[in-house]
Amino acid sequence: MGMGMLGVAVRLRRCLKPLNTTILSSYSYHSSSSNRRRKNENQVDSSFNRDPTSPPRLFVVQPRLRPDTLLQAKLNEALCLANSLEEQRDGYFDSDFFDKPLPPHILVQNPIFRSSKARADTYFGTGTVDDILCHIRAIESKDVVDAVFVNAILSGIQLRNLERKWNKPVLDRVSLIIEIFNAHAHTKEAKLQAELAALMYAKSRLVRVRSSDGRLTFGAFGDAEVVSARGRGSGGRGFTSGAGETELQLQRRRILERRETLRTQIKDVRRTRALQRASRKRHCQLDSQYLATVAVVGYTNAGKSTLVSALSGNDLYSDSRLFATLDARLKSVVLPSGRKVLLGDTVGFISDLPVQLVQAFRATLEEVVEADLLVHLMDSTAPNLEEHRATVLQALQQIGVSEEKLQNMIEVWNKVLQLYSILLP
């Protein structure tokens, strides 16, 4: 298994311990014991089990990295991602994050180390693929494995071939993050944006496979059949009919149609937010006092919601799961000078954040772009602190934050007392 489970558990709980101070996809993979249910025909198919009491059991595959400190940080993050895939119930999670057992995992050879690029068909080499299969079978002799999470970015072909080899659904880093966003979306706005991200991802993952009964199908499991134009009906007029539309083209068209519908609804959300900002400015002009907006940004699970709760005196919901907050929440705060400002809690960022999510959640992230001041909250106990800082800066630039705001951004370190307890003997 590479690294002892006990050692990983201790480090994981130490890095993600609660604060000492007051301060997706076209397919989803939840418990295999429940049957898949079909969504609206204009939406992507889903095998998502919406029962929050039975979250999926994932087997984590972590490619080795150098140095060991980076490997440890990435492994901890991968385990947290796997345990964060859980459906909410009325805006809350059914179980405590720290009560959940660590997912089974394995450290494997990173194909990037041996050559300039990974294999185009399976990402890993043949020996590594077979080794992972042996571990899956060994774990399944004692427990259930619903899906395999590979903490890397895989192509549609690689996902399809690995699913064939392991006979399990396979999630890469991008698809798991999208799945988590869909599972954690609670408000209408978050659900619209999460579904849009899933559709954008699904469009690039319609890969043809051979189903169990031998039919040519597409998708992660081949749920939808790829029928020839002649078998499904032809278009055209007269004696010579046209080629018609294949099932693959039909599903792509349905995804595009649904995407346009979602974009229209999200435009309404952005319009509403713009009206709210304009209304706040009008009220400030009447009161002869400008109400500034301060957005708290940072890596996921850095403690943004807890900080906003402490400063505003409001009990905002916070959780140790990654991406527990998907909506922008504004709370009024009175500064020591007596001036009132609006403090905003925002969705967190993560390395290799799917571009589909950044584009889909632009309505929510507009609160960051329009804010007067940014506060970058950082987890001081993170071993890859510089990577977290660079990830957040890159994401802020990607959503259109001006260079002036980035230069004036205030950096705040969280969990400092916890850092001292780690560094001091």
Image (tube, helix red, strand yellow):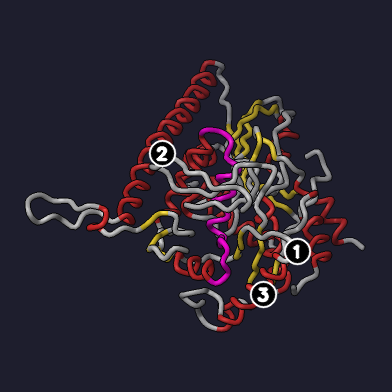
Viewer-side label of 2, 1: 1
The picture quadrant where one finds residue 265 is: top left
Q: Which residue is mark 3?
A: 134
In this view, which residue lies farthest toward the front? 213
Q: Position of residue 312 (x, y in %)?
A: 71, 30
Q: Residue at x 44, y 59 (%)?
A: 222
Main SS class of the magenta portion in the image: helix
Q: Which residue is mark 1?
A: 142
Q: Position of residue 272 (x, y in %)?
A: 45, 28
Q: Earlier in the sequence, mark 3 or mark 1?
A: 3
Q: What kind of element bears circle 2?
A: helix
Q: Residue at x 28, y 56 (%)?
A: 246
Q: Is residue 101 magenta?
A: no
Looking at the rendered structure, the kind of residue marked 1 is: Lys
Residue range corresponding to the magenta coloring: 165-188
Q: Which mark is residue 262?
A: 2
Q: Position of residue 57 (x, y in %)?
A: 67, 56
> Crowding near pointer 1: few (<14 within 10 Å), some, many (20+)?
few
